[in-house]
Image (cartoon, grey):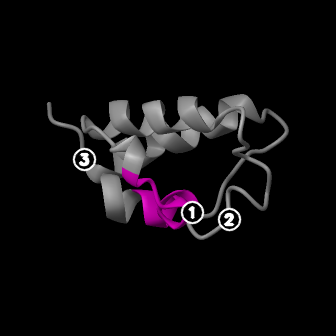
Amino acid sequence: MPSTTSSKIDAVRNWLLAKHPERTAIAPDEDLITARLVDSLSFVEFVMTIEEAGDTEIDREAIDLADFRTLAAIESKFL
């Protein structure tokens, strides 16, 4: 059964929640960087999680941080 966009973004959300067990939810428009849900140490793993969820490859030479700030932006750009 093919993945829907919502299940793809849920995979990314679940990865974030697994990294932050103190959290129970992440709003689609919450700034993931300001909220410290993604930091420089976890960013590469975060990008790989998005690639896996979306079955896509993200060009690391052309990364725009704005595309990764919220779940809504990630869903719109990559999933």
| Image disc number at residue 31 | 2
Q: Position of residue 21 (x, y in %)?
A: 79, 32
Q: Position of residue 56 (x, y in %)?
A: 25, 39
Residue 69 shown left or right of residue 74 in the figure: right
Q: Secondary structure at mark 2?
A: loop
Nearer-the-camera pick, 65 or 25: 65
In this view, which residue lies farthest toward the bottom?
29
The CA span between labels 1 and 2 is 5 Å
Q: Residue at x 46, y 44 (%)?
A: 10
Of pointers 3 and 2, the one earlier in the residue sequence:
3
Q: Which residue is mark 3?
A: 4
Is 67 inside the magenta-drawn segment?
Answer: yes
Question: What residue type is disc 3 on?
Answer: Thr
Residue 45 shown left or right of residue 77 in the figure: right
| Image disc number at residue 37 | none
Graded by Cα atoms within 10 Å as few (under 14), some (14 to 19) or many (20 or more), the crowding at tag 3 reads: few
Q: Tell whether label 2 touches label 1 (CB within 8 Å).
A: yes
Q: Which residue is mark 1?
A: 70
Q: Residue at x 77, y 36 (%)?
A: 20
Dividing the picture into quadrants, the one containing residue 30 is: bottom right
Q: Compared with residue 27, is residue 54 higher up or lower down, i.e. above or below?
A: above
